[in-house]
Image: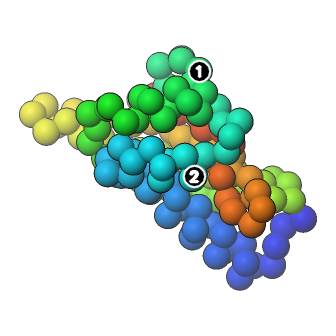
Amino acid sequence: MKPKANAHDTICVHLRACEEALLDPAVRRDGARVAALLAEDFEEFGSSGQVWSREQILELLAMEEYRQPAMEDFKCHWIADGAVLVTYRTVRTEPQSEQKSIALRSSIWIEESGEWRMRFHQGTKSL
């Protein structure tokens, strides 16, 4: 059941902030902060075609070199009681070449014990 408009808007603002946090290099290196945002059974289909578990993502993010991309066209779709699909595009510009790298992103967020956790994420390279 979709919540009333004000509650829906509040949840969408919160989930956007969570997605933005997961794009922040400082948050990505903080395993406790990332773990708090991911469901225990989290799974990611990466733009490389690799499938990642929660544990693999926590290990990977702790060691990665990462430049934060811009987030564009954020949308929030209520798909079931306590489940929201968010979609957006990330754009990263390489400093030396000015070449843009664009990815389409989607995440499923579920409410667990009053907290929102990401259950699934997929990134798809775009032209």
Image coordinates of residue 87 in percent, x first then y, are: 59, 49
Image coordinates of residue 111 in percent, x first then y, are: 75, 58
42 in relation to 2, above or below: above
Residue that badge 1 annotates: 51
Q: Which mark is residue 37?
A: 2
Describe residue 9's horizontal placement relative to residue 74 as left or right: right
1 in relation to 122, above or below: below
> At 74% across and 53% down in the image, what residue appears?
110
Describe residue 112's horizontal placement relative to residue 117 as left or right: right
Image coordinates of residue 119 in percent, x first then y, are: 68, 42
- Who is closer to the viewer here, 44 or 125? 44
- Who is closer to the viewer here, 82 or 102? 82
Image coordinates of residue 42 in percent, x first then y, are: 66, 37
55 in relation to 17, above or below: above
> At 55% across and 46% down in the image, what residue appears?
35
Which element carries disc 2, helix, strand or loop? helix
- Rounded to the nearest angstrom, the CA distance separating label 1 from label 2 is 18 Å
Which element carries disc 1, helix, strand or loop? strand
> At 39% across and 48% down in the image, what residue appears?
30
User: Looking at the picture, which amino acid does disc 1 mark?
Assistant: Val
User: Looking at the picture, which amino acid does disc 2 mark?
Assistant: Leu
Asked if the residues shown at circle 1 and circle 2 are in contact, with their CB atoms under 8 angstroms apart, the answer is: no
Describe residue 56's horizontal placement relative to residue 77 as left or right: left
Q: Is residue 95 visible?
A: yes
Q: Choose mark 1 or mark 2, whichever is in front.
A: 2
